[in-house]
Image (cartoon, grey):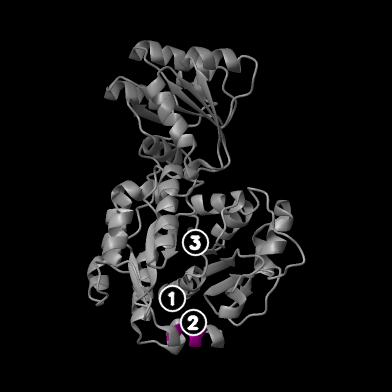
Amino acid sequence: MATANLAPVEFRGVDAAPLPAPEIGAPPEAAARDAVRIPHIAIDVFCESPEVMDAVERAAADRMMARAHVALHHGGLAAALALYANAATPNLILIESRSSAAAFLQELDALSQVCDHGTKVMAIGYTNDISLYRELMQRGVSEYLLAPVDPLSLIRAISSIYGEAAAEKLGRTIAFVGAKGGVGSSTLAHNVGWMIARNSGSHVIMADLDLPFGTGSLDFNIDAGMGVADAIEDPGRLDDVLLDRLIVKHDEHLSLLRAPVSLDRCYDLDPAAIAPLIAVAQESAPFLILDMPHLWTSWARNAVVAADDIIITAIPDLANLRNAKAMLVHLRQARPNDPPPKVVLNQVGTPKRPEISPKEFAKALQQEPLACIPFEAHAFGTAANKGQMLPEVAAKSAAVRMIGGLADALAARTDAKAVTKRKFGFRSLVGRLRRDSRG
């Protein structure tokens, strides 16, 4: 069949749009995690085997696919032809076929006759043959995967097809959440964000999502305001222009989305209320820090699950251990294709307070803490009361060195050797990020 008959299907070869290289400190398999999320597209999937159906279902549930609408169908190409005889085709059609190479090509030729302009086609087959691959590419098929497939391979393939849309990389979202109230999660979030902005020279947006009681305005010595509340009140009108009016600049590289800190209303938000704010902020800055309140509502859970990195702050006692373990179990199940959340032990070595040792804490969690921040009451209290960051009042303290290493690791701005040279009393932060990512 002549190639011209496949004009509606746009061509993009397997090597046409490689994924961006992973950040320093991330393993090669984390490339899909660092690529832009799949754009707002509709995907129809036609499967012939339960194995591929299962892989597609798991890929569709991944946070990287949150903006795509995926519809699964049984029956392969025959089902696709029957459906599109009377329906428009979506942005992307994913076809699994167990047919022979010759029969597969004939089926695709028939599919091309019903494809609308702009529809792309991705194929999953069982024939490992370069001649077949070349024939598929000549016919305008965007990607060919050899079965069996896994969720991350599917995500990478879809991202490569939409490489042009992925060219403008979204900023990384880092969610800080406490295993218990009062453990210093907000203080850690503010200081890490401040250090990333200062050390990397990158723009950081700090979003204070503790709407009634947030401390972001206090810690940065800025008046409270309606930044976050206004942003989520009418998400349909939120764009980068409105966001720029709502944020308050702390300095050249750090901006704050303030919490209203008002009890005049309740903040029972829609489960998806924060998602538009996160999406716009990610397009506006390389780093978005989410200072999460200690609660477990639908919107708070969704915001944490969707983050690129999750930092659980805990102090070394039994309640924090129980809560941190429960959060790790839940988030690992909710994010099966992501590295596990990181745990930071805070207020370690508080005088006269019985503690679980970091070693025993790690053993119970079956995960080593990413950092152990010592208790330095005077330094933290002074910074809080002055509305300053910890490095501004106690630049040489052990806690500042520890938080600085954590900020460097999260920003992936230093190599493992450089971080190891800091005498933190624990193994390389970047190296641990690598190991945890593989886990």
Where on the picture, by quarter, is residue 250?
A: bottom right
**Which is closer to the viewer, label 2 or label 1?**
2
**Which is closer to the viewer, label 3 or label 2?**
3
Q: Looking at this view, is 235 or 97 the one in front?
A: 235
Residue under the image location 41 percent in, 88 percent down: 394
In the rendered image, the residue lying farthest to the right is 264
Kind of residue indicated by mark 1: Met
Q: Earlier in the sequence, mark 2 or mark 1?
A: 1
Q: Looking at this view, is 164 or 88 the one in front?
A: 88
Q: Earlier in the sequence, mark 3 or mark 2?
A: 3
Label 1 and label 3: CA atoms lie apart by 18 Å
Horizontal side of residue 56 vs 116, given as left or right: left
Residue 14 position (above or below residue 412): above
Dominant secondary structure of the magenta stretch?
helix
Kind of residue indicated by mark 2: Met
The label shown at residue 195 is 1
Say how many tags the image has. 3
Residue 106 position (above or below residue 219): above
Return the residue at label 3. 177
Return the residue at label 2. 389
Callout 3 environment at 10 Å: few (<14), some (14 to 19), or many (20+)? Answer: many
Which residues make up the magenta segment?
379-383
Kind of residue indicated by mark 3: Val
Horizontal side of residue 305 vs 439, given as left or right: right
Q: Looking at this view, is 126 or 272 the one in front?
A: 272
Verify whether residue 406 appears in magenta.
no
Where on the picture, by quarter, is residue 378?
A: bottom left
Residue under the image location 37 percent in, 15 percent down: 98
